[in-house]
Amino acid sequence: MQTFHIYSESTELQSVVIGTSRQFRADQSYVEYINKKQIDTKPPTEEVLHSELQGFRDVLISRGIEVFIPTAIGSFVPDQLTPRDIGFIIGDKLVISNMSCSSRRYEVFGILETIKLFDLSDKKVLIPDADVWIEGGDVIVDKNCIYLGQSNRTNKNGLDFIRRHFSRDFDVFPITVNDHANESRFLHLDCVFNPVGSSHALFFRDGVIDIPDRVLKNYEIIEIDEYEQAELATNILTISSETVIVRKSEKLNRVNTLLKAHYDVIEIDFSSVVATGGSLRCASLPLIRK
Ligand SMILES: NC(=[NH2+])NCCC[C@H](N)C(=O)O
């Protein structure tokens, strides 16, 4: 039986859940508008989402990574594209998220069959109390640290929870996401900051209120601008210390070219998923990294 294992954002990815487009907005009456991108953009079709997610899956499989797809739960869950948020692994523990948006609250049912394939003994699954909000997009585990976004989706109780359970093994750093206009423009920490490969991090400085010294010490920063942030430029997926998967888009040419100077960069089409507010990191929930 396999054990969850996540201590890094960049060591070799071995097992991952990715999003599914099945039943995407199948019943309009359940659609909830929960982020700015989604409000401003015409919703993509299930077909084009499916083809992008297939492309993502094919790349992962071609690299020898085990890929799980959530089961479609029912039309009352309108969007299962971004499993990153519904739970997350720290060390050998799975934390099941309390989702702040009601339309996402039952999304985790789609991965229960996958979870049951793993060793859950000795309290490896943590279920926070109802007033504890943490979504996986706000959780970054890397280089003995946990960076925890404080956002509309992850609250102070979430920070206390992470400190209580994990500060013995990790240094925990809160990073406040700058949502001054309260318009859910920067949904999660990973929409403004994300480590890339072994030694860099993509970072939109105006997206946070404060930045821990440890971030500046641990990473060579690649700054991104407001326009690139809106294209979710930070939201890439590192699959090994040398290899990253990014979105192919003219709008991201500058960033992708910078990344190519340091890493093996795999570019895939993902613009439709981005139109719903998430990109490659959001669309993936790593279960095991070497
Ligand atoms: N980790 C992330 N940044 N996730 C993005 C989630 C997008 C999703 N549609 C939502 O608004 O909840």
Image: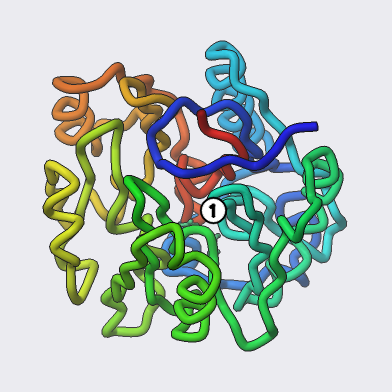
Comparing 272 with 180, the one in front is 180
| Quadrant of residue 185 within the rendered picture | bottom left
Q: Is residue 52 left or right of residue 104?
A: left
- Determine whether 109 is above or below 290 in the image: below
Coordinates of residue 252 in the picture (x, y in percent): 24, 36
Q: Does the closest atom of ligand 1 sit within 8 Å of the Cβ of label 1? A: no
- Determine whether 29 is above or below 240 in the image: below
Residue type beneath disc 1? Ile
Coordinates of residue 135 in the picture (x, y in percent): 54, 66
SS at mark 1 in the image: strand
Which quadrant: the N terminus?
top right
Q: How many marks?
A: 1
| Quadrant of residue 237 within the rendered picture | top left
Comparing 149 with 90, the one in front is 90
Q: Is residue 54 left or right of residue 223?
A: right
Residue that appears at 44% across and 39% down: 271
Coordinates of residue 83 in the picture (x, y in percent): 62, 51
Residue that appears at 52% across and 43% down: 6
Residue ID for mark 1:
90
Q: Is residue 264 left or right of residue 272?
A: left
Residue that appears at 12% across and 41% down: 220
Comparing 18 with 250, the one in front is 18
Q: Is residue 56 left or right of residue 224?
A: right
